[in-house]
Image: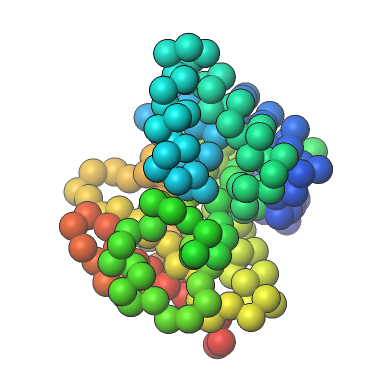
Amino acid sequence: MKSISEISIKPLSSELTQDYLDFFDNRAFTDDNPNGPCYCTSPNQDEKMIKKMVSEFSINGIKETLRKYAVNMLKNNEIHGYLAFDNNVVIGWCNAADMRSYSGFIPDFAYDCSCGKTISIVCLEIAPEYRKMGIASALINRVCSDAKEKGYASVEGYPIFTDMHNDFVYQGPIKLYEKLGFEEVVRQGHQMVMRRFLNV
């Protein structure tokens, strides 16, 4: 089993486009995870763009269409987050950016209780064989450390709470956020806002 110290975390950049695509092409969702196929494009698309993308599913196929949009968005720096590497292979992804940069992936009620400059975590995906090894924790801790350096007040996650086993929920499990010092701020329906203040 790999040691977490052997894993490196890098902010997504255009230079890492091929690594990003390789992860979603070959390792993400290989366990029939119901969230796939996906290239994590939707969080940074407006409703009009999502509808246009979906309208192309029947022409090129779902995965191919999502990939095409991801390539274009990566070229234009429109997807933000962090990649986890085992040597030169990507084994995890965290979509995280300024709260204001997202269109529909943050619950409306989160804006009602915002507390200054905030980084939002809207998606986590770890390659199946690397789960339960602390990769998601390492990604989130890097998000928090970079956010603090950039003067952000807090980092938020928006996990879903249900009676069902939620390892496959792309927002990340509640217990993960609790373990990393996030506290529940508010909940509505089946979703909650969990926040970690960065000034402590």
Q: Nearer the viewer, residue 60 or 144?
A: 60
Residue at 68%, 29% in the rendered image:
22
Quarter of the image where one finds residue 183: bottom left
Residue at 36%, 70% in the rendered image:
111
Q: Nearer the viewer, residue 33 or 20?
A: 20
Position of 97 relative to 165 (above/below): below
Position of 126 relative to 193 (above/below): above
Q: Quadrant of the C terminus?
A: bottom right
Q: Is residue 30 visible?
A: no
Residue at 31%, 74% in the rendered image:
112
Task: Give residue 81's position: percent from left, percent from top.
Answer: 62, 53
Q: Is residue 74 visible?
A: yes
Side of 143 where 9 appears, left or right: right
Quarter of the image where one finds residue 86: top right
Side of 168 where 148 appears, left or right: right
Task: Give residue 6's position: percent from left, percent from top.
Answer: 75, 50
Task: Give residue 82's position: percent from left, percent from top.
Answer: 65, 52
Residue at 47%, 29% in the rendered image:
53
Task: Give residue 88's position: percent from left, percent from top.
Answer: 79, 38
Q: Nearer the viewer, residue 157 or 31?
A: 157
Q: Nearer the viewer, residue 57 or 184?
A: 57
Looking at the picture, the colour scheme in use is: rainbow
> How many circles with numbers are drawn on the protein?
0
Q: Residue furthest bottom?
A: 200
Q: Quadrant of the N terminus?
A: top right
